Amino acid sequence: MSADVLDRPPRRPQRELSPRERRRLALEAALENAISSAKVDPSAAFRVDLEQGEKVPAVRLAFNRVRERLAAGGVNLLSRDSVLFIANRPQTRGRRART
């Protein structure tokens, strides 16, 4: 054992996550898998099924957070007939890209 252990402050017990935080982390983990897979395979598309009580704007915000963290600029969240898909495709609606 080294003397450095004596200098470190004691670790506080980690608080338990709320159900809302657990759902958010689960959603972000699922989105991370789909985004990284779509980034590797441009021919793949992944369907996003909303759970009870989930809303599209919340999913879109989580998607944007995960996409930015993974630096997957070409992967987009697309809507076709009110169904959400994740694919490595250009965005066809919305704001134009800044040049």
Image (spheres, rainbow, N blue to C red):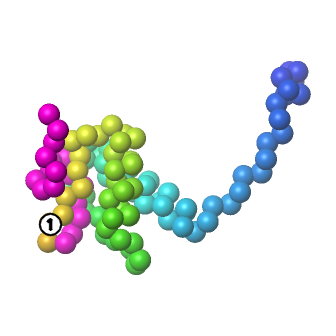
Q: Considering only vertical position in the picture, is 25 above or below 51?
A: above
Query: Mark 1 = which residue?
Result: 80
Residue 61 appears anywhere in the view: yes
Looking at the rendered image, the quarter that the N terminus falls into is top right
Residue 44 appears anywhere in the view: no
How far from the left and from the top, in percent, is residue 77? 24, 56
How far from the left and from the top, in percent, is residue 83? 21, 69
Q: Is residue 51 magenta?
A: no
Magenta stretch secondary structure, dominant: loop
97 vs 19, left or right, is: left
55 vs 80, left or right, is: right
Residue 4, by quadrant, is top right
Taking the spot 17% from the left edge, 38% from the top edge, the residue there is: 98
Taking the spot 55% from the left edge, 62% from the top edge, the residue there is: 21
The amino acid sitting under disc 1 is: Arg
Q: Secondary structure at mark 1?
A: strand
Q: Considering only vertical position in the picture, is 10 above or below 80?
A: above
Q: Considering only vertical position in the picture, is 99 above or below 88?
A: above
Q: Residue furthest left?
A: 92
42 vs 59, left or right, is: left
Q: Residue furthest bottom?
A: 52
Looking at the rendered image, the quarter that the C terminus falls into is top left
Q: Which residues are magenta?
A: 82-99
